[in-house]
Amino acid sequence: MDLQKHAQKPDTARPAVELRASDADRDRVADLLRDALAEGRLTAVEHAERVEGVLSAKTVRELEVFIEDLPAAHQRRATPAYAPVPPRPMAGAIPAEADASVVAVFSSAMRRGRWRAGRRLHAYAVFGSVEIDLSEAIFEYQQVVIKAVSVFGNVEIRVPENVSLRGTGGGVLGNFEVDTLDSAESDAPVVYVDGWAVLGNVEARPKRGKRVADILDRVQDKVDQALRKHLDR
């Protein structure tokens, strides 16, 4: 009897490969296929066929099929594809006081562009609108907390699509909506949104096409250019 129960256990657990694929997962596999084409491991026709399949794949397992015969896929499997992200930041990791606050009372306020994201940011919208765009922000810390409170107002938060996003809060005759997001990178920043929407709206979701790595690359390019100009003088 015990042997039968033991044999049935694998069927009760859903394997990780059946996870729904995200846009970041498809981009990762497409990058591996592009590298394989450049190395001569795939022909142009094979590459085109596999990329077409990647774009239509629904699960992580379907994506893995297109790279199973590539060395890069086996090297990547040496580390976990997904690192568990806790629903709340680690105790003591985030200060109680905010590094900055964005307040809109019968008005609008925003924080966007290239700016440094601290560990804690407070956003208050009272009969007003607050926009916080982290898609081009510089993350100095891995964990960032945004406390968002909306009273007859609107707080809109946008993050890069390759960070992890978590939300804890609720609404009182209002809407509190945070799109849970898991990054494939274990050291990616984690943005925690906490707060309430009272007859208002709090919304947090990824901004498609914006990635932390892209921003860091552009910043590094500007530093290199400035250094070269300085050395040429």
Image (cartoon, helix red, strand yellow):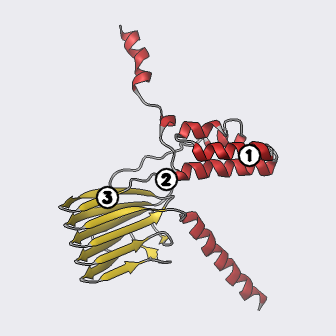
Residue depicted at 21% across the width and 72% down the height: 152
Q: Which residue is mark 3?
A: 177
Image coords of residue 166 (percent x, y): 36, 56
**Relative height, residue 166 to residue 126 (above, below):** above
Tag shown at residue 166? none
* Of the image marks 3 and 2, the number of the one nearer the N terminus: 3
Q: How many neighbours does mark 2 have within 10 angstroms: few (below 14), some (14-19), or many (20 or more)?
A: many
Amino acid type of the residue tagged 1 in the rendering: His
Q: What is the quadrant of the C terminus in the image?
A: bottom right
Q: How many neighbours does mark 3 have within 10 angstroms: few (below 14), some (14-19), or many (20 or more)?
A: some
Residue depicted at 43% across the width and 46% down the height: 84
**Relative height, residue 132 to residue 159 (above, below):** below
In the displayed structure image, the side of residue 205 where residue 222 appears, left or right: right
Q: Which residue is mark 2?
A: 183
In the displayed structure image, the side of residue 42 where residue 172 appears, left or right: left
In the displayed structure image, the side of residue 28 where residue 104 appears, left or right: left
C-alpha span from label 3 to label 2: 19 Å
190 or 35, nearer to the observer: 35
Amino acid type of the residue tagged 3 in the rendering: Glu
Under circle 1, the secondary element is helix
53 or 125, nearer to the observer: 53
Amino acid type of the residue tagged 2 in the rendering: Ser
* Of the image marks 1 and 2, the number of the one nearer the N terminus: 1
Residue depicted at 43% across the width and 15% down the height: 7
Would you say residue 90 is visible in this rendering? no
Q: Which residue is mark 1?
A: 47
Image coords of residue 154 (percent x, y): 29, 71
C-alpha span from label 1 to label 2: 25 Å
Image coords of residue 91 (percent x, y): 31, 57
Residue depicted at 67% across the width and 40% down the height: 67
